[in-house]
Structure formats: structure tokens, C-alpha cells
Amino acid sequence: MRLERSGAFGNVAQTMSGVRGSLLLRTHLDEIYHDASSIPGSARVALTAELSDPAARRMLGRRSFTASVPARSHDAAGAVQGFNEAFGVVLDDVAAWVGSVAATER
């Protein structure tokens, strides 16, 4: 959804949809960690994204993204809210990065 809303792409489809696109974004979740050593704790998310042009068999870029936000409270519900926020930050950063890399390839 974030990539679609960015306006940088005409169409966005999932890999398993059968649609062939000119760019392929792969992501790998490297870390999801709730640090509860202090109150209220923090939620940390790290992922790696790779953008490639499958037709040209060319890697356009690879980058790691990390976000750490305070948990809302020192319990599981607070950690989940923190993870939601951290994922939002990371996914916004990924969408901006993909848009900028794709713009340089056009």
C-alpha cells in the first residue's frame, strides 16, 4: 500500500500474483526485538530490502532499515503498539528509498 500511495509507480503487485513487473522488491526481516530491560521498554525492527531489475538481471540497490520506538507500556500490548509504530517508520523509509532508486533508473 505504501508503494502504491507514494505515486512513484503505475502499478504495484505482490510476487505471487502472476503479474510481471519491471522491478522486484525483496525484503527480509532481520530483527524484531522487544527490549524490556527498562520501563516501558522499546520495540526494535530491522529489515533488509533489495531492489532489482529481473529482466536485466541487475541489482539496483540493497539497504538495511532500522527503527526503534518506545513501547506504549511495559506489557505485551504496549510492545505490540511499539512494533506497529516501528514497522510504520521502516516501511515509510523503504517506500521512499525504492521511489528514489526507481527514479534514477528511468
Image (cartoon, rainbow, N blue to C red):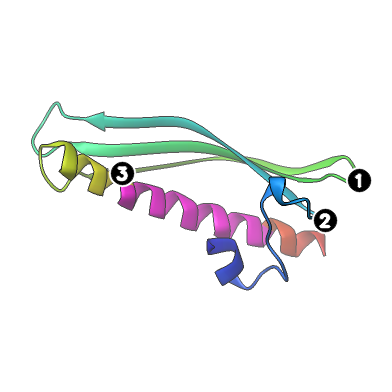
At x 32%, y 30%, the residue is: 33
Q: Is residue 34 left or right of residue 78?
A: right
Task: Quote the CA–CA distance across marks 1 and 3.
Answer: 36 Å
* Residue hosting label 3: 83
Q: Is residue 47 above or below residue 10?
A: above
* Label at residue 20: none
Q: Residue furthest top?
A: 37
Q: Is residue 48 left or right of residue 90?
A: right
Residue 55 drawn at (x, y percent):
90, 47
At x 78%, y 50%, the residue is: 18
Disc 2 secondary structure class: loop
Residue nearer the viewer, 64 or 52:
52
Q: Which residues are magenta?
A: 84-100
Residue nearer the viewer, 57 or 17:
17
* Residue hosting label 1: 56
Which label's residue is closer to the chain start, 1 or 3?
A: 1
- State which quadrant residue 96 falls in: bottom right
Verify whether residue 91 appears in magenta: yes
- State which quadrant residue 8 falls in: bottom right
* Residue hosting label 2: 22
Q: Residue furthest front?
A: 17
Q: Is residue 102 above or below residue 75?
A: below
